[in-house]
Image (cartoon, coloured by chain):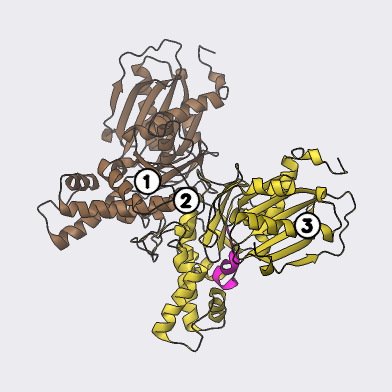
Chain colours: A yellow, B brown
């Protein structure tokens, strides 16, 4: 590993009521460019956070070392011994076999195949661990304490560089045969290319309305039409300019919202689902949410689903990981009891 | 009602082992043009069938009268008293609230709105009744004794005049918030129109690859290109000509299969479902199934679902209705016991 690349940050909540006997859980948000950790007590109160860059880090063992560093820093900050850690849960950016604890495949940025992440975490911490797909954890977070609080049936739709969805049915993640339900970045709607790419490459839908896709659409339109705005803008910058009244940026916003409304419409037809929560760096933009709801309205549905922006934003996955860690303590309390804490 | 229109047919299995004490159930397949009934004993053996036309019949009371005539004929054929009828189950061509027993809306051909079909059947027969959407019942039939026997997760996709799907998850129908899951006749894929029609009108997908849509596509192509074949062909006749080598008919078959493969691909992305059973008069055609599987193969999926043709064909819904009737006997055996049979 290359420890010189790692600039970690830590933040601690001041008025924590932790005592010597307090147990803790850690949630891990493992992204393609950043690793983020949150420490909470077993009642679910977040005590401290930690983060570092993962740019250039691909190997699972390196990632585990980073997580270990982070957990040690966090426990140190709250003056807790290592056995105070009761569970760890991590979200990975890819298809994940939750039962076996294996990350089957991650996106083109990480390229993992069949990584036994749960076992690696359990070995590293001698504590029960759980893993899930990052979008599923974001949905869990929104359901626990965000926009979908109390909703039994909803779809969390993450739009960042890629596009993915988590389908929540009757309060639980619907996963499909190969843990790949909700892989809608590949969806075919009017306006997407129909010639498929290779596995791991951007899918049809995300190639047009994912973060990179939107940039590409902007650059095409910029070259054709010309504007005073720069050619090199991010998706959210383009949406900001659309909100500010730029006509060319509005064209991109409308096109993105129209194709997103088609994808949501198709999912809503299949699932008859009342609520879609939009998350991810691009999906969270308020202009995209309102424009997409407008476009959905034009599709004349029998029961139009409600769109909401993620309430937790970039913390959705981290909060979901904490929730999963808390559930892991409760579901497997005795599993790692041999190195028991002073409370047991 | 107009009884002169009704030309009923009946067929009876010769080697039935019914005795005086035998209980019976009736399954009802209520279609836009035909009403079909099947009588089975409570072990599920089909004893007799009955059918009549429903052309011109829309009113629910008229339909109930027809069902009553049919049930009486069937019981007469097996020399059973009326109280030998232990349950009735009916499938309606529209969105159905299974809990309340209400048909919320049927297609443009029937135009029912909020018809309490279960209560009407229970009043008519003084026996427990159950109702469901016809495509859901066809899926139940295939799952009981057809192509999806033993499958816990599959989609039954019916293509006739319209297009609808039943989503089976973990052995049960997935219904959605408003009982409208699987209404994929409205799906938007590359090649469908994107301007929506009114409720009750054909949806985007079925306007191109439903039975009528395919005829329209054929007539357009026929006018543009010319061929020795007649202009007025049904979808299945066109597919037959494609199998026989007609190039123009092959163009229509390929276009239909391509758009059907897009719809299945989109559903498979959302649901990660391993099996799709194709049913309905158009969907059953062997050429459509094999051509669509070929097109799916070109979409380079991580896990390509298997396509199968319905094994029960036009009997799928009727068999599903019988299965539901049998389940209704078992789930509510004492509900209508006041006019008890001699067995009780």
Residue A51 can be seen in this image: yes
The answer to whether residue B186 is magenta is no
**Residue in the picture at 56% in, 73% down:** A287
Q: Which residue is mark 2?
A: A270
Question: Which of pointers 1 and 3 indicates the residue nearer the eye?
Answer: 3
Residue sitting at x 27%, y 51%: B212
Nearest the viewer among B278 and A297 is B278
| Mark sitting on residue B110 | 1
Q: Quadrant of residue A10?
A: bottom right
Q: Are marks 1 and 3 in contact (CB under 8 Å)?
A: no
Location of mark 3 (residue):
A72
> Which is in the foreground here, disc 2 or disc 3?
3
- Give the spatial CA distance, label 1 vs label 3: 68 Å
Q: Are marks 2 and 1 in contact (CB under 8 Å)?
A: no
Mark 2 → mark 3, Cα distance in angstroms: 45 Å
Q: Secondary structure at mark 2?
A: helix
The residue that appears at 49% across and 89% down in the rendered structure is: A228
For the record, the magenta segment spans: A276-289
Chain to which mark 3 belongs? A
- Marks 2 and 1 sit apart, C-alpha to C-alpha, by 23 Å
Task: Check if mark 2's residue and mark 3's residue have beta carbons within 8 Å.
Answer: no
Q: Indicate the position of residue A188 as horizontal and vertical percent values.
A: 41, 59
- Residue farthest bottom in this picture: A228
Query: Is B167 displayed left or right of A141 in the figure?
Result: left
Task: Give the label on residue A272, or none.
Answer: none
Q: Judge if badges 2 and 3 mark residues of a common chain.
A: yes
Place of residue A275 in the rendered image (x, y in percent of width and height, measured from the top left):
58, 56
**Residue B291 horizontal/vertical position (percent):** 28, 47
Q: Earlier in the sequence, mark 2 or mark 3?
A: 3
Q: Is any atom of residue B88 visible in this view?
A: no
For the residue carrying disc 2, how many other residues have a C-alpha within 10 Å: few (<14), some (14-19), or many (20+)? many
């Amino acid at each position: 590993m290359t420890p010189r690349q790692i600039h970690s940050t830590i933040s601690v909540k001041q008025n924590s009521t932790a005592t010597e006997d307090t147990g803790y859980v850690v949630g891990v948000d493992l992204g393609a460019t950043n690793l983020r950790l949150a420490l909470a007590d077993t009642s679910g109160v977040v005590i401290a956070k930690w983060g570092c860059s993962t740019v250039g880090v691909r190997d699972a063992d390196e990632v585990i070392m980073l997580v270990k560093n982070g957990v040690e820093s966090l426990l140190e900050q709250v003056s807790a011994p290592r056995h105070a850690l009761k569970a760890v849960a991590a979200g990975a950016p890819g298809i994940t076999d939750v039962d076996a604890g294996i990350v089957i495949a991650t996106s083109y940025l990480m390229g993992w195949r069949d990584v036994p992440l749960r076992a690696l975490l359990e070995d590293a911490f001698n504590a029960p661990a759980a893993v899930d797909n990052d979008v599923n954890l974001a949905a869990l977070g929104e359901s626990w304490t965000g926009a979908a609080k109390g909703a039994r049936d909803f779809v969390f739709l993450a739009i960042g560089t890629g596009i993915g969805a988590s389908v929540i049915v009757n309060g639980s993640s619907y996963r499909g045969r190969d843990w790949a339900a909700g892989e809608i970045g590949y969806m075919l709607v009017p306006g997407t290319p129909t010639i498929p790419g290779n596995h791991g490459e951007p899918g049809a839908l995300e190639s047009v309305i994912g973060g990179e896709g939107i940039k590409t659409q902007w650059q095409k339109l910029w070259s054709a039409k010309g504007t005073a705005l720069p050619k090199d803008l991010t998706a959210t910058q383009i949406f900001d300019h659309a909100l500010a009244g730029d006509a060319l940026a509005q064209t991109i916003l409308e096109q993105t919202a129209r194709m997103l409304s088609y994808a949501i419409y198709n999912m809503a037809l299949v699932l008859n689902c009342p609520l879609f929560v939009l998350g991810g760096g691009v999906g969270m933009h308020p202009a995209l949410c309102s424009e997409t709801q407008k476009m959905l309205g034009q599709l004349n549905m029998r029961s139009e689903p409600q769109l909401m922006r993620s309430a937790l934003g970039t913390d959705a996955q981290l909060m979901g990981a904490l929730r999963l860690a808390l559930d892991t303590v409760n579901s497997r309390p005795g599993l790692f009891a041999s190195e028991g804490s002073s409370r047991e």
